[in-house]
Amino acid sequence: MPRERLDQPRELKRSLRPHYDPEDFGRLSERIARFLGTARFIVYMTVFVLCWVLWNILAPDGLRFDPYPFIFLTLMLSLQASYAAPLILLAQNRQADRDRIQSEQDRQAQEASQAELEFITREIAGLRLAVGEVATRDFIRSEFQQVKAPQ
């Protein structure tokens, strides 16, 4: 078996598996999940089911494609649900990942703010101590008066 060289790119291999970008697929699943959670989707789905049922009840016998127990409609709704559930879960997982990252960033920012606050507090305490040791104007006057008085 020939050894792979690290200084040369690999040869492209053909694959029969379809290639997809997981990030693009995740964004698509989020858009679908967002749409499935709207009143608009419920209205569209209700209109679709009503049209389906009315057509298969009221249309002439030769034009009906799914008679009364509406087995094909049940199959279509089951298929839609079987795709919707994993897409919604994928969107929720992506949101949980984003929330986890945001929480970590918030924690780091809070730690930095806490460290800065502690530094500023120490600086203020140091300034207070330094100001306490500074000679005041009144103290200097009294010292000058004592120095001038003995003469």
Image: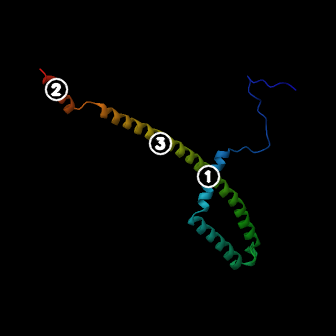
Q: Residue at x 78, y 23 (%)?
A: 5
SS label for mark 3: helix
Q: Which residue appears farthest toward the top when viewing the image?
A: 151
Identified by mark 3, the residue type is Gln
Q: Residue 45's spot in the image, x, y percent?
A: 63, 68
Residue named by callout 1? 96
Residue named by callout 3? 114
SS label for mark 2: helix
Q: Quadrant of the N terminus?
A: top right
| Colouring mode (rainbow / by chain / secondary structure / one colour) | rainbow
Q: Residue at x 72, y 61 (%)?
A: 82
Identified by mark 2, the residue type is Gln
Residue named by callout 2? 146
Judge the density around disc 3: few (<14), some (14-19), many (≥20) Cα neighbours within 10 Å. Answer: few
Q: Residue 150's spot in the image, x, y percent?
A: 13, 22
Q: Residue at x 63, y 55 (%)?
A: 92
- Work out how far the residue at label 1 is from the one at label 2, CA to CA, in angstroms: 76 Å
Given residues 59 and 35, the one toward you in this image is 35
Image marks 1 and 2: residues in contact by CB distance under 8 Å: no
Q: Residue 40's spot in the image, x, y percent?
A: 57, 65
